[in-house]
Image (cartoon, helix red, strand yellow):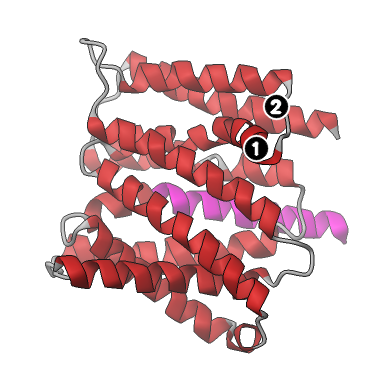
Amino acid sequence: MKAMQEKKANFILFIVALIWGGGFIAGKMALTAATPMAIIFYRYSIGAFMCAIAFRTRIAKASGSVIIKGIVIGLIQLAGQYVQLSGLRYTSSANQSFLCTAYVAFVPFISWVILRKRPALREFGAGFAALIGIGFICLKESLTIGPGDCLSVLFSLIFGIQIVLVGKLVKNDTDCMAMSFFQLLTVSVLSLTACTLSGQMALVPTWEGITGILYLGILNTFVAFVGQNYAQKYTRDTAASLIMSFESIFGFVFSVMYYGETVTCRFMLGGALCFAAVLINTIGKGKEK
């Protein structure tokens, strides 16, 4: 029975990775209809609304501690999402799909700074592989890095900080569903405030843009979030992180299929090194247990 639950959970996580891979295309599509901050507002408002309907009883019983944790994580989430979408304006979705997975290599070092946990030797190796891979993807012939690629790497750093803090804040008795609602609600309210003050609420009603926003709100935010939270109860952390890291592969494949993006040998080598960093970290952790 336990083995069957784990297989089901792993399959769900595979679907989550597939959805997230499509999210890089959806983000690019959404940018044709609205600014990054407006997209964040629409996306997280949809996610928070659906979450409120699905988990209204648990949300009503949420403690003050759960609410505060959701707000803290939401603040970091807002910063990360804004940086990611801003970067996607100036780089390809294929580039970003690999660059954003650098968080897997960054997390051990962020944990070193925040939690004082020194990374293992293999994690230094993974970080080095990711750094070289980022160089192959980002560096131009003049040895300069475009603004979109810089922002994509910055997002992976912010997301890495979020992962470490979630691990520190979330305890066994924390209701993750209720906490996630307040996380989504925080992002929604703050992005609405920013849009109102800056006059960025405008939405161009194009088919491509609306489709991108709905995909991000319904699938990327609500469905993937519920799937991940459910599945991680029944599978190992190492297996979960490895399966979900396939979002980079899916994002790359979808980008080539949808936008017909050019694939160079240097890009493929860089992507392979970034993905190798993920494998080094996740498989290495599995062997340590």
Q: Which residue in the structure is indicated by mark 1?
A: 111
**Can residue 15 be found in the magenta stretch?**
yes
Q: Is residue 214 visible to the viewer in this orientation of the structure?
A: no
Distance between the Cα atoms at labels 2 and 1? 8 Å
Image point 72% across, 69% down: which residue? Answer: 174
Question: What residue range appears in magenta?
Answer: 1-22
Amino acid carrying label 1: it is Ser
In screen coordinates, is 121 left or right of 145? right
Return the x and y of residue 92 as percentages of the image width and height: 26, 36
Residue at disc 1, secondary structure: helix
Amino acid carrying label 2: it is Pro
Image point 77% across, 47% down: which residue? Answer: 236
Callout 2–callout 1 Cβ contact below 8 Å: yes
In screen coordinates, is 41 left or right of 156? left
Image point 47% across, 79% down: which residue? Answer: 50
Asked if residue 20 is positioned above or below residue 48 in the image, the reply reads above
**Can residue 16 be found in the magenta stretch?**
yes
Q: Which residue in the structure is indicated by mark 2?
A: 119
